[in-house]
Image (tube, rainbow, N blue to C red):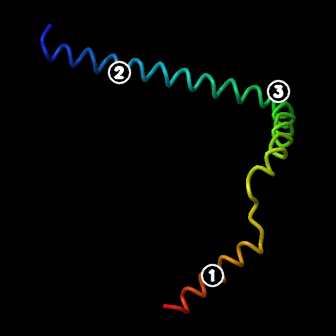
């Protein structure tokens, strides 16, 4: 098998694999849109509510930015500019 034939076979294989992935993707998008049209949106809303409850438990783990902390940061920036 010559070099040109090898590269042609490799390129054709890549094109076929990418086409298969594209068809799979299009099929999954069509399936999702059909589920949403039949009422899957209600199921998604219930899932979002559960996700919100999980997120509420994690809110204490990370610091929350408040207006006071933002204004403190801007005041610090203004003070450093005045010192220049």
Q: Secondary structure at mark 3?
A: helix
Q: Residue 18's image quarter?
A: top left
Disc nearest the viewer among 1 and 3: 1
Q: Position of residue 2 (x, y in %)?
A: 12, 11
Q: Position of residue 79 (x, y in %)?
A: 60, 88
Q: How far is the residue under mark 1 from the one under mark 2?
A: 56 Å
- Decide: is 27 above or below 51: above
Between disc 1 and disc 3, whose residue precedes? 3
Q: Secondary structure at mark 2?
A: helix
Residue wearing tag 1: 76
Residue wearing tag 2: 14
Please identify the quadrant where the N terminus is shown. Answer: top left
In the foreground, 29 or 50: 50
Residue wearing tag 3: 38
Disc nearest the viewer among 1 and 2: 1
Residue drawn at (68%, 23%) of the image: 31
Residue drawn at (77%, 68%) of the image: 66
- Decide: is 1 above or below 37: above
Q: Secondary structure at mark 1?
A: helix
């Amino acid at each position: 098998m010559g070099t040109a034939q090898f590269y042609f076979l490799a390129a054709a294989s890549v094109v076929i694999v990418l086409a298969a992935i594209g068809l799979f993707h299009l099929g999954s998008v069509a399936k999702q849109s059909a589920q949403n049209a039949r009422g899957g949106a209600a199921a998604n809303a219930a899932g979002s509510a559960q996700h919100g409850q999980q997120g509420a438990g994690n809110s204490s783990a990370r610091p929350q930015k408040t207006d006071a902390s933002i204004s403190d940061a801007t005041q610090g920036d203004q003070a450093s500019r005045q010192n220049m």
